[in-house]
Amino acid sequence: MQIFIVGGAVRDELLGRPSADRDYVVVGATPEALLKQGFRPVGKDFPVFLHPQTHEEYALARTERKSGHGYHGFTFHAAPDVTLEEDLARRDLTINAMARAADGTVIDPFRGQRDLSAKILRHVGPAFAEDPVRILRIARFAARFSDFSIAPETLVLMRQMVVAGEVDHLVAERVWQELAKGLMEDRPSRMIEVLRDCGALARLLPELDKLFGVPQRADYHPEIDTGIHTMMVIDQSALRRFSLPVRFAALTHDLGKGTTPADILPRHIGHEERSVDLTEKLSARLRVPNDCRELALLMARYHGNIHRAADLKASTIVTLLEKTDALRRPERFQQLLDACVCDYTGRLGWENRLYETPQRLLAALAAVNAVEAGKIAAACADKSSIPERIHMARVRAVKVQLKDAGDQPEQQ
């Protein structure tokens, strides 16, 4: 029995990058042999075991054969006679098809080290085309290793897979899993670029694909269409190390612009409602977690009003805070403001303009929170008037706050 470290841990070590996990392949062993050593089985489709002390994953060397469509359309063969090279041959990219032996020797049958040095993402072999998840994975790796290029023959193969309809068989959970991971990489726009280049974006995220070629507002730079702007926005969310909900909200905030009638372009009248509708449908289709979905819907509906905060009356600001549930959920409201910062800075020339909206709205929220709603409610003889009384008290508090901040009273 021989044990090898495989995959990403070897790749990251050669790149000098930290690696969160270490995966192991066991050659020349049986499930019974590992069970006798205290390993605990966890694999449903093929033999994977957890080490009794470290709880790291150890998988028996295996081969796989295409038996159907999609990610689950495979049959696996794991036996003591499966070699390390046969196991590595089933992996996606050459840079992920390396192993390290116990003595430190790197086993590299597919020249992964060469491609690491050349900064190329290249598929291992024709078996790549059997698993559509690999299109998502290579797009995600492009977002992580943003200075790597995709080998031309690999891109051709990806396009052929899309034309063959392989991506149409991907399950929603797996699409979301890879999309979420890609959004959390250093340059998530590369993931979208790769998916678009191979044709997969139109099949998996058609709402997003429709943004490319659609002009932004007339006062924006004409060379930056809505799709490019969205890519700049998600890269800003990565640059600022924001959370996944913020990054997903940045991705979906302008989806409605892709359905703007051509005769009113470059204006986008009513795109907020269309964005809400499309974001809701996309989230349902991909089974997006609630925290991401809820923030994305708020961003789609309210980011325009938030950007115009400097021109809003106190009453409108209070209504905005109430509708976004900022009083009960201030952490989520902060995420909403973070997404708006990404939207504002995701365009050319933003460095020369101040964006004071977050500070303005947070100061207004502090003023609203200082209103003693309980006392107002207790003093109301007519209980039906309580919500209105509290709302008006909040408006008065924000008017005072804005006046103290230097705004002119007539603007309130």
Image (spheres, rainbow, N blue to C red):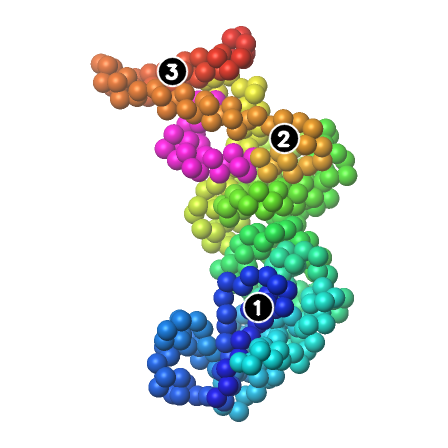
**Distance CA(mark 2)–CA(mark 1):** 47 Å
Residue under the image location 59 percent in, 61 percent down? 17
Q: Around disc 2, counting alpha carbons within 10 Å, would you say few (fewer than 14), some (14 to 19), or many (20 or more)?
A: some
Q: Where is residue 140 in the image (x, y as percent from the top left)?
A: 61, 59
> Closest to the observer: 228 or 13?
13
Tell me, yes or no, whether the highlighted magenta stretch contains residue 88.
no
Q: How many labels does the image show?
A: 3
**Distance CA(mark 3)–CA(mark 1):** 58 Å
- Whether pointer 2 and pointer 3 mark residues with C-beta atoms closer than 8 Å, the reply is no
> Closest to the observer: 130 or 80?
80
Q: Is mark 3 on a helix, strand or loop?
A: helix
Please tell me in which quadrant of the rendered image residue 252 appears: top right
- For residue 8, the mark is 1
For the magenta stretch, what is the residue range? 317-340
352 left or right of 79 in image: right
Q: In this view, does 359 lie above or below 69?
A: above
Q: Is mark 2 on a helix, strand or loop?
A: loop
Does any portion of residue 258 appear in the rendered image? no
Does any portion of residue 148 appear in the rendered image? yes
Looking at the rendered structure, the kind of residue marked 3 is Met
- Whether pointer 2 and pointer 1 mark residues with C-beta atoms closer than 8 Å, the reply is no
Q: Which numbered mark, 3 or 1, is in the foreground of this view? A: 1
Q: Which of marks 2 and 1 is nearer the N terminus?
A: 1
165 left or right of 325 in image: right
- For residue 392, the mark is 3
Q: Position of residue 260 (x, y in %)?
A: 65, 37
Name the residue at the front extreme: 103
> Closest to the observer: 284 or 44?
44
**Distance CA(mark 2)–CA(mark 3):** 31 Å
Q: State the residue position of label 2.
A: 269
Name the residue at the top extreme: 410
> Closest to the observer: 232 or 107?
107
